[in-house]
Image (cartoon, rainbow, N blue to C red):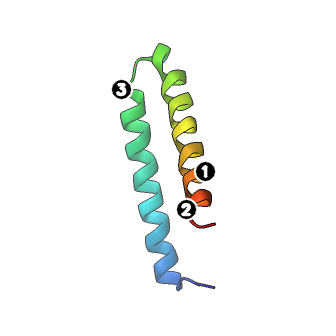
Amino acid sequence: MLNLTDEGMARFNTIEKDMNLKFERVFSMIPKEKQSQVLEALNIYNDAIKKSEVECCD
């Protein structure tokens, strides 16, 4: 098990917040009528990654 120090957790939260803001900024530049397609594609991609990780390590 891995635990972060208070400083490590603060740093993690800052990075997480920055990444979310960047994603929101980029996503907002995608036309509204295409955003659902992008989200669907990302979900398909994430599912494929999960499947490949399971298959990789059996």
In the rendered image, residue 47, in percent from the top left (x then y), is placed at 60, 44
Q: CA distance from mark 2 to mark 1?
A: 8 Å
Q: Which mark is residue 51?
A: 1
* Marks 2, 3: nearer the viewer: 2
Rendered-image quadrant of the N terminus: bottom right
Q: Are marks 2 and 3 in contact (CB under 8 Å)?
A: no
Q: Secondary structure at mark 1?
A: helix
Q: Amino acid at mark 2?
A: Cys
Residue 50 or residue 16, whichever sits in front: 50
Q: Residue at x 55, y 44 (%)?
A: 48
Q: Is residue 47 above or below residue 15?
A: above
Q: Earlier in the sequence, mark 2 or mark 3?
A: 3
* Residue designated by label 3: 29
- Location of residue 40 in the rendering, given as x and y in whole percent from the top left corner: 56, 29
Q: CA distance from mark 2 to mark 3?
A: 36 Å
Whole-percent x, y for residue 3 in the image: 59, 84
